[in-house]
Image (spheres, rainbow, N blue to C red):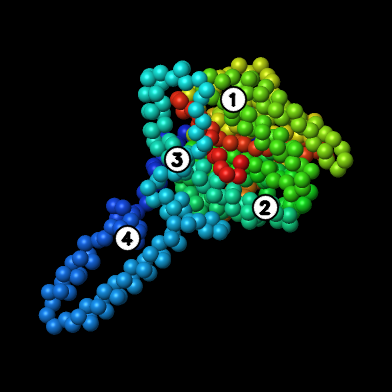
Amino acid sequence: MGSKTPEGHRQEPDAHTSDIKPANPQVKAGRNGSSSADMDRGIISDEDDDEDDHTKEEAGVSETSNSDKKQKKRKRTKKNKKKNPATTKQTTPPRVPLSTLFPTNEYPAGELVPYENTARTTDEENRYNSRLWDDDNFLRDYRKAAEIHRQVRQYAQKELIKPGASLSAIAEGIEDGVRALSGHQGLEPGDFFHAGMGFPTGLCLNNVAAHWTPNPGAKDVVLDQNDVLKVDFGVHINGRIVDSAFTVAFEDKYDNLLTAVKEATNTGIQHAGVDARMSDIGAAIQEVMESYEVEIDGKTRPVKAIRNITGHDILRYQIHGGKQIPFIKSKNRDKMEEGEVFAIETFGSTGKGYLYDDVGLYGYGRNKDVSGAHLRLASAKSLLKTIDSNFGSIVFCRRYLERLGVSHYHLGMKNLIDNGIVESYAPLVDVKGSYTAQFEHTILLHSGGKEVISRGDDY
């Protein structure tokens, strides 16, 4: 999710998140999982031995009866084995919680990339890093969120995103998948803070670069064969947000645009690391992206790096932190630091390479620095209570409010915006007739290397 410059879109951390208790642990059938899983590993329970001994000791029991019982036992064993695989494979659409697929809570690591210069790493840094990543299950939460993102987006790529599909159906399919795999529907106060969407699904067509999502009551938009679609969504586990995006086009004429942006994002990842300067990363991104041009309908256009939207660091329950990574050469002297989490993303355009606010609404974000104690409008007070108990500092949209059963909220929302308690976000667009593309990954900066946590086989 891009951060608009120069002011940026910051969401402050939820003041109540320190009081949130961890989600209920999964109930295990036994120390090593289910009985069928034990059998698959060759572990035999004591129950079967006891039954056999008891049968042998009973008088008057025929050998035929014993044989029948053994046959029945073998049938039950086969039946259990047939059932087990059904609980260890993802469904279509994805509905099996990740806690079921990974009962040990060990989730796949992302792409691990060592730094070119490892001489800077000291024993003290390693000790600090160990504390940083191991506390509060930091890596477990991030890797779980990343695996949910991979499974849901790959389902969307195969089953949802195709010409003739409505953008509402795509958004709902993605968000239903995230909620099902995380195991949290977010319909009860406080449940959303355990896991769910990191921000509303962005589905941006053509010259719309960022921050567009379907709104209830609006005319539905249908995906066309000639469209260029950006898909940007986030997944969070206990406030650890994975932010990743990709672009889909059905016509070959857009290939160079997509390649330019994907290569630029990978260049940004390559140059990212501890002590890397934002200005150097931005210069490298711009050089790669603007080395491409694209021919569309007989007209050759240069690919331009969009200059007023940036990548960003990610904080807990806060998609945009205080650091920005431009896509162009700049005077930004900020450095990346060990232990930080960044969304490395790039946007390229065949237009002017500059975005402005369009009509419409993407979503809302709570400004935690502003109190609602002075509010007088009853509807605004009630709406603020709903926002604080269901979203906190995570960006949300109208669909999310109405999913909770909230209605007639527009007057109250206007009052919250007018008082600076809530900020609204508009779609960001380049000039009409232009095409934009986006690719994005979340990276974690370890002491000895970076982990591209959201990397997958698709991009």
Q: What residue type is labelled 3?
A: Asp
Q: Which of marks 3 and 2 is in front?
A: 2
Front one among 285 and 434: 285
Is residue 315 something that shows in the picture? no
Residue receiving disc 4: 39
Chain-order first, disc 4 or disc 3: 4
Chain-order first, disc 1 or disc 2: 2
Q: Which amino acid does label 2 sit on?
A: Ile
Image disc number at residue 207: none
Q: Which amino acid does label 1 sit on?
A: His
Residue at x 55%, y 30% (from the top left corner):
342
Chain-order first, disc 1 or disc 3: 3
Chain-order first, disc 2 or disc 4: 4
Name the image quarter holding residue 220. Answer: bottom right
Q: Distance between the residues labelled 4 and 3?
A: 30 Å
Q: Residues within 10 Å of mark 2 (few under 14, many from 20)?
A: many
Residue receiving disc 2: 161
* Secondary structure category for the residue under label 3: helix
Front one among 40 and 265: 40
Residue at x 22%, y 81% (from the top left corner):
65
Locate residue 428, reporting x and y percent.
Answer: 72, 36
Residue receiving disc 1: 271
Locate residue 10, reporting x and y percent.
Answer: 59, 30
